[in-house]
Amino acid sequence: MRTILAGLAVLSALALAGCDSGKSQLLQGWVEAELIFVSPDEQGRVETLKVREGSQVTKGELLFTVDDDLQRADLVVRKSTVTTAQQAFDRAKELLKTAAGTQKNFDDAEAALRQANANLAWSETRLARRRALSPAEGTIQQVYYRPGETVPAGRPVVALLPPGNLKIRFFAPQAQLPEIKFGDSVVISCDGCQTGLTGKVSFIARSAEYTPPVIYSLDERAKLVFLIEARPDQPEKFRVGQPVTVSLPKEPPK
């Protein structure tokens, strides 16, 4: 779908490139999302899924849990190791006071205790991360794994769309680039949308998206188009993948 929309946007820009820039300022584009993918650090089986596609979530809200039997077992071992290391450190400390121990034995016991505590903290972190919390406020855009399914490490279980992570993408012909500046306001329209929706240019590509194999003439150079992105001022009014029409700022009369 994205490829089709991008192709149409390029054709629109190329058609506009052959027209008088003073007569038309309309370009076709589409709505794209910058999703946040939430995944477990380690492989596991999804135990609970607290959301579904379309769910509104707040930052810190529980999204899903992954089985934690191995992490809990590891935590028990780490706690036992800390207890043993603490006892060894206490003995070495007392022996050092009575001159029956050596400084080296004390230093070794102290280092072992530090390492045991560090391993315990890491084990606690591993266990805590089996509960996936939402990193931001937003909408669940897609669910990839369901309870009972095994998810590999780093593979997303859900995709989250924060309200500010929508952008409008469209292509502009080379001839119009001098008219477009970072931060410029554009008017965005779409089927079924309210009128007067606006956005601000947030990105202008430095290289052309479409380049003829060999550029010999001005006509060929007119086929160059550049990707432009704009952030809508009211992102909640748009849907991912939605085709839109972008009206560029009109060039002031000379």
Image: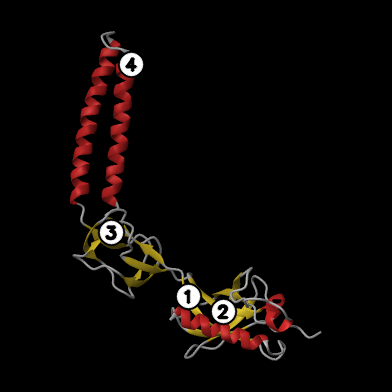
On the picture, is 15 further left or further right than 117? right
Which of the colour schemes (rainbow, by chain, secondary structure, one colour) is used?
secondary structure
Kind of residue at disc 2: Phe
In the image, taking residue 11 as reference, residue 127 lies left or right, namely: left
Of marks 2 and 3, which one's residue comes earlier in the chain? 3
Q: Residue at x 27, y 23 (%)?
A: 89
Which residue sits furthest right? 254
Q: Quadrant of the N terminus?
A: bottom left
In percent of the image, x 27 and y 43: which residue is there? Answer: 123
Disc 4 residue type (three-letter): Lys
Q: Residues within 10 Å of mark 2 (few under 14, many from 20)?
A: many
Look at mark 1 in the image and give the residue it sits on.
32
Residue 92, label in figure: none
What's the distance in space between the residues labelled 2 and 1, CA to CA? Answer: 10 Å
Residue tagged 2 = 170
Number of other residues with Cα within 10 Å of mark 1, as a class: few under 14, some 14 to 19, many 20 or more: some
Which residue is at the front of the view, 50 or 67? Answer: 67
Q: Position of residue 149 (x, y in %)?
A: 21, 65
N-term mark: 4 or 2: 4
Residue highlighted by disc 3: 152
Gap between marks 4 and 1 measured at Cα = 62 Å
Q: Is residue 245 left or right of residue 46?
A: right
Residues under numbered marks 2 and 3 in contact, where contact means CB atoms less than 8 Å apart: no
The residue at which mark 4 appears reads as 104
Determine the CA span between mark 3 and mark 4.
45 Å
Task: Give the number of the mark in front: 4 or 2.
Answer: 2
| Residue positioned 67% across, 85% down in the render | 17
Residue sitting nearer the eye, 28 or 114: 28
| Picture quadrant of residue 52 | bottom left
Q: Which amino acid type is marked by label 1?
A: Glu
